[in-house]
Amino acid sequence: MERFVEAPSVNAAGATLRDVFADVFKDRPTLRGYILDDQGAIRRHVAVFIDGAQAKDRARLSDPIKPDTEIHVFQALSGG
């Protein structure tokens, strides 16, 4: 994602993945379109890992988040 939009590591608060994303998007609204689709679900070509495990709820983003949780967002590459 860094190629198209600045995406530095940040500290964000929230009890669910949706809450954390909302906190991040407050200061970086451009990231929303790269990560979430028009319905607010994680885009098909984006992988989100919560403490090393892939996010389970890609539609509602209800995965629980603890204060020390690490979340990583990766955009898949394609081409030939």
Image (spheres, grey):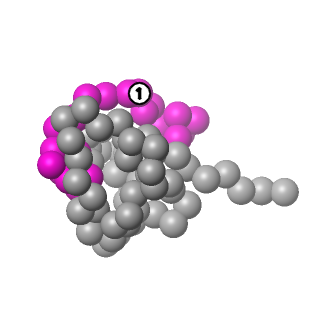
Q: Which residue is mark 1?
A: 8
Q: Position of residue 34 (x, y in %)?
A: 44, 52
Per the image, label 1 sits on a secondary structure element best described as: loop
The answer to which of 26 and 49 lies nearer the viewer is 49
Q: Position of residue 60 (x, y in %)?
A: 26, 68
Kind of residue indicated by mark 1 = Pro
Give the image quarter of residue 35: bottom left
The answer to which of 65 and 6 lies nearer the viewer is 65
* Residues rendered magenta in the picture: 1-20
Give the main secondary structure of the magenta stretch.
loop
Placement of 69 over or under 42, stated as above or below: above
> In what quadrant of the picture does the C terminus appear?
bottom right
Q: Residue at left 77%, top 56%?
A: 79
Q: Is residue 34 visible?
A: no
The answer to which of 3 and 56 lies nearer the viewer is 56
The answer to which of 57 and 7 lies nearer the viewer is 57
Q: Is residue 48 visible?
A: yes
Q: Is residue 3 left or right of residue 54?
A: right
Q: Residue at left 39%, top 57%?
A: 55
Give the image quarter of residue 73: top left
Placement of 67 over or under 42, stated as above or below: above
Circle 1 residues within 10 Å: few <14, some 14–19, many ≥20: few
Q: Position of residue 17 (x, y in %)?
A: 26, 52
